[in-house]
Image (tube, rainbow, N blue to C red):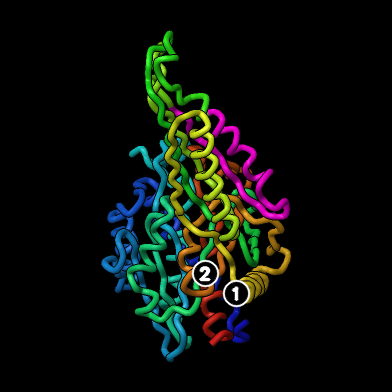
Amino acid sequence: MQQDLNPQDIIDEIKQYEKRLIDFRRRVHREPEVGFDTALTLKKIAEFLKENGIEGLDTAASPGSGFLLIQGSKPGKTIALRADIDALNITEQSGCPWASENGMAHSCGHDGHQTWLLAAILYLSRHRGFAGNILCIFQAAEESVNGADSVVQSGVFKKYDVKEIYGAHNEPLLDLGMIGFRAGPTMAACDRFEIDVKGVGTHGARPNLGKDPLPAAAEIFIALQTLVSRTLDPFKSAVVSVCSFTAGNPNTYNIIPETVHLLGTTRTFEEPVRDLIEHEIKTRSVGIAKAFGLEAEARYIRLVGAVDNDTELTDFAERAAAGMFGSERTLRLTEPYMISEDFSAYQKVVPGCFFFIGVRDKEHQAALHSPHYDFNDRIIMEAGALFAYLALSSLADRQ
């Protein structure tokens, strides 16, 4: 770590901005936006930066996202810090005075993520004696897992020659202030599958005059439940979940339907396992339908790859966190998460580290994506200080 950089000085300076940062977070929370439709959020970010004497937020490079380049006083490499800014289509029930009322909600804490990045920017923009550049990314459409890919496709990583990237997520499963790290596979790849089983509809009293797709669809459903346990190496991990099974009109009781539609998700950590799961879903669906004299169409849509943390960067980030807060507040996560994150798109082009910051206390127990969730403001200043310290340490120690 950079020897002449006092972590406590960073924390103390950022705490001077506590009220304005919390006020910003709650304003964004009150008016959440989803997907790439984040113009109002970006406007709030730009206004906050301008109010604090910081110009240059680029909102044109990639749909819905914003970029701020903080240039040091000396030449050097460019690293990136990323925060997501989109919300969810959830009706909030948190009961807090700043709760959303527009049918969308920051129930995953992205309002807090963008605020802790702003906290880091407030410090970094006033201390430019470092060698290199820091690209701050306010990313849209993480929840639809295609925002990061849009950023990569925009060319900003090539434009600024980004060498590495860091990001984090708040974690209600960790106590407030704890910071969790894991090297290697950390969050699962997320894919979607759709299966249509096609029959011939008829009167429920005359099934012999049609071809009922329901028994075949039920067999496919059962076959998918045993896919992982009977096909995959027991030392590998995967999840296959059928989450929707629809057929016919819910208000009609005497018509055998024409089709049955199955919709589900898979989670994997390795590409060979991902390939195997896709093959098995398609093969089993078509084969079972054929055995019933029917046709099935199975579609497999790859959404986002696994978050695979660079070992060297993860070790470095953990040392930075321990240097700032003490080793008692850092931990190595022993198991990966089956939930997904499109941060993996960045890791396809540069090494990256994605870690987790605990927010659980007595007043903040709700899970991510719960309508009762609200971000814990008590972590904003320390998280912002950590990102600032991590960036400065990387530019000083990893040129």
Q: Nearer the viewer, residue 115 or 273?
A: 273
The quarter of the image holding the N terminus is bottom right
Give yes or no for residue 177 being in the magenta stretch: no
Residue with the mark numbered 1? 313
Q: Position of residue 142 (x, y in %)?
A: 43, 55
Residue with the mark numbered 2? 166
Q: Is residue 399 visible?
A: yes
Mark 1–mark 2 contact, CB under 8 Å?
A: yes
User: Residue placed farthest to the top in the image?
Assistant: 205
Please rate how many residues cluster around mark 1, counting C-alpha atoms within 10 Å: few if below 14, some from 14 to 19, many from 20: many
Q: Is residue 227 left or right of residue 136?
A: right
All told, the count of numbered labels is: 2
Seen in the picture, residue 269 relative to 361 is either above or below; the reply is below
Point 47% across, 57% down: residue: 304
Q: Position of residue 176 (x, y in %)?
A: 63, 54
Query: Identity of the amino acid at label 2?
Result: Tyr
User: Residue placed farthest to the bottom in the image?
Assistant: 74
Query: Identity of the amino acid at label 1?
Result: Leu
User: Residue placed farthest to the left in the image?
Assistant: 60
Q: Position of residue 22 (x, y in %)?
A: 45, 55
Point 53% across, 50% down: residue: 279
Point 41% across, 45% down: residue: 88
Q: Is residue 93 left or right of residue 180?
A: left
Q: Is residue 12 visible?
A: no
